[in-house]
Image (cartoon, rainbow, N blue to C red):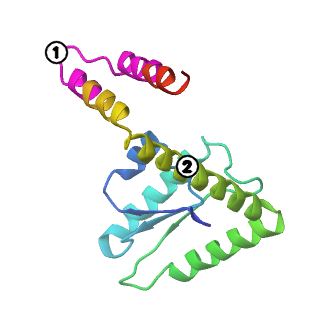
Amino acid sequence: MVDVFLLLQIVGAGDDLQGMKRGILECVDLVVVNKADGELRQKAELEAANLKKALHLFPQKHAGWSTEVKTCSSIEKRGIASIWHTIQAHQKHLKSSDQFELQRRLQTEAWFADLQNKSLFDFLQTLPTVQALLTKTKAELSGANPNPISLLREMKTALKELFLR
């Protein structure tokens, strides 16, 4: 639910590979490697270069926008203006290509779906029959050979029977 997805990394944390594993890099608009100062500056530049190479493996998130990688140092007050300029350029690009409004609409739809699902689940949990079903299912999950997929299927069948009578 953001206009710019900025991934902030610190030098030497090994997060570049972890980010790829978690799928974060496919979502970002801008990556910033922080703490690029003193003896860590060269290492930060190397990490930024490696991230730039990795980002070429992913499709563009927004047509016509390539995810940028920047370095910065708050101690040396270096790179921050460049980051802000990139954020503004990103916003200008999205707004000029109507992608900004599309992104906002998709975010609103996702937010509504999330609220709807949570609201429905909260309501279902107030029903005594569903409370009993959830308690039974949790107990079975604690058993010797829990099978979450099978338990979910059983729960779905029980809920269908409850509501489609």
User: 80 or 152: which is nearer to us?
Assistant: 152
- Highlighted magenta segment, given as a residue range: 137-157
Question: Is 125 located above or below residue 132 in the figure?
Answer: below
Residue at 39 percent across and 65 percent down: it is 42
Question: Please, what secondary structure does the residue beneath circle 1 have?
Answer: loop
Residue 43 drawn at (x, y percent)? 37, 61
Numbered marks: total? 2
Q: Nearer the viewer, residue 57 or 148?
A: 148
Q: CA distance from mark 1 to mark 2?
A: 35 Å
Nearer to me, 117 or 148: 117
Judged left or right of residue 77, residue 147 is left
Name of the residue lying farthest toward the right:
97
Quadrant location of the C terminus?
A: top right
| Lateral position of residue 72 relative to residue 55, left or right | left
| Neighbourhood count class around disc 1 (C-alpha, 10 Å): few under 14, some 14–19, many 20 upward | few
Q: Residues within 10 Å of mark 2 (few under 14, many from 20)?
A: few
Is residue 145 in the magenta section?
yes
Residue at (38, 15) in percent of width and height: 150
Q: Earlier in the sequence, mark 1 or mark 2?
A: 2
- The answer to whether mark 1 and mark 2 are in CB contact below 8 A is no
The image shows residue 54 at horizontal and vertical percentages of 53, 45
The N terminus sits in image quarter: bottom right
Label 2: element kind = helix
Q: Callout 1, which amino acid?
A: Ala
Q: Give how far across and how far down residue 41 sits, in percent.
A: 38, 70
The residue wearing badge 1 is: 144
- Quarter holding residue 90: bottom right
What percent of the width, then of the height, locates residue 55? 57, 48
Q: Nearer the viewer, mark 1 or mark 2?
A: 2
Q: Which mark is residue 21?
A: none
Residue that label 2 marks? 116
